[in-house]
Image (cartoon, rainbow, N blue to C red):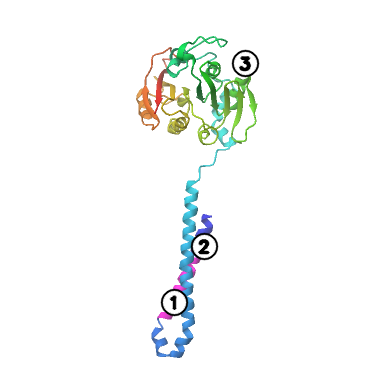
Amino acid sequence: VTALHLGLLLLLTLLHSSSLRASNHQTSHKVKIYRSRTVQDQNAPIIIQNMVSSSLCRLTLIVVLLQFKICISFAAEQPPQSTSFSEYDQKLEVWSKRWDNDNTNWHRNMVNPILKSLGHLVGVPYFEDTESSCLSGDESQQQLRVFVPLCGKSVDLAYFATHPNVSHALGVDGVSKPLEAFAKEHEHLKIQRTSDDLSNSHRWLGNNIELRQTDFFDISTREIEEKFDVIYDRAAIVAIDPLLRQSYLDTIGHFIKPKTGKLLLTVVERTADLLAGPPFSFSDREVRDLYESQSWVASVTGPLEGEPDPGDDPAKWISKTYLIQAK
C-alpha cells in the first residue's frame, strides 16, 4: 500500500508541475491576450482548462496524502503478528535439546523446600496428605488460582493442583516434551491433550490443572483472560535473557490479580562467573529496582528466610526468595 501511494504521489506531482508550467506560460502572454480580443477568446478555454487541471491535481494530492496518512496510522495500531511455532521453536532450541538429552539439572523430583517453608505467605501452606486436608480454619477455605510460568515438568505444579486451597493451576512452557512427560508421570491428575482453535498453542487439561505449550511473551493477549491469585516463579525469570525481563514482567502484570495477587519469586545471585547463564544472576538491588518500578507492584519483601534450595551451589550461586504484592 505504501509503495502504491508513493508512486501515485510521484506521478501526480509531475502532472501538477506540468500543469503549473503551462499555466505560467499562459500568464506570460497576458499582455498579448489583452491587446487582442480575438487571441483572448481563443486562449480563454485553455487558461480555464489549465486552472481546472491544476485544481484537480491539488485536490487529488490532498486525497492521496490523507489516504497515505490513514494507512500509516492503521499499520501503527495493528498488534504484532504472533510468532509461529517454527520460529518460536528456534528460539527455544537450546532448551529443547537439553530436554531431549535429559540435561535438566534444574529439575527436582520433590516439592521445592521454598513451598514448604514459605507457601503460607501466598495462602498455600504446606501439607503432605493429598487424600485428606490437614489445614484448619481460614487456611482451608480459600480457592486460589495459581500460575506457574516456564514450568517444565515441575513437581510443584502437581502439588498446587492437589492442594486443598487451589481450585486451578496453570503451567506454561515453550517446550512440549516436559509437559507431555508431566502428564504421563502424574496419572492421578487425569491430564489429556485437547484440541485448541489457537494454532500457536498446545493444551492439556486435567483435574484442577491446565498445561499450555506456547510463547510465554505472547500468551497474555491471545489465550487467557483470567487473573491469578498466586504466581509462583521458581527461577523462571533468571532462565531468560536479562534483556527480556521487562517483557516477562509485562506478561506477569497482565496475569496477576489486582490488590490481592501475590508473586512468590525465587532468583539466583551468582558468586562466580557473574555474567554466565542461564541461570542469570539477579542481585537484590536489581530485583528491587526492577520490581518496584512496575506499575502493578505494591511492595517487595525479602530476601525471605526459608529452607535452602537443593540446587544451590555456594561456589556458583545462592538462591533468594521474595514476596511481591500486587497493587
Front residue of this view, candidates 237 and 64: 64
Relative image position of residue 210 (x, y in whole percent): 58, 25
Left or right of 146? Residue 180 is right
The answer to if 251 sits in the magenta stretch is no
Check the image and report above or below for 66 versus 55: above
Check the image and report above or below for 29 versus 7: below
Left or right of 319? Residue 149 is right
Label 2 and label 3: CA atoms lie apart by 66 Å
Res. 203 in view? yes
Task: Classify the position of the C terminus by image quarter.
Answer: top left
- The residue where tag 1 is placed is 23
Bounds of the magenta span? 11-27
Q: Nearer the viewer, mark 1 or mark 3?
A: 3
The answer to if 26 sits in the magenta stretch is yes
Report the number of numbered marks: 3
Task: Classify the position of the N terminus by image quarter.
Answer: bottom right
| Quadrant housing residue 321 | top left
Q: Secondary structure at mark 3?
A: helix
Q: Secondary structure at mark 2?
A: helix
Relative image position of residue 250 (x, y in whole percent): 44, 33
**Is label 1 in contact with label 3 (beta carbons under 8 Å)?**
no
| Quadrant housing residue 123 | top left
- The residue where tag 2 is placed is 8
Task: Identify the mark at residue 144; answer none if there is no mark.
Answer: none
Left or right of 204? Residue 110 is left
Q: Residue at x 48, y 68 (%)?
A: 57
Q: Main secondary structure of the magenta part?
A: helix
Q: Secondary structure at mark 1?
A: helix
Q: Amino acid at mark 1?
A: Ser
Q: Amino acid at mark 3?
A: His
Task: Identify the mark at residue 188; answer none if there is no mark.
Answer: 3
Label 1 and label 2: CA atoms lie apart by 22 Å
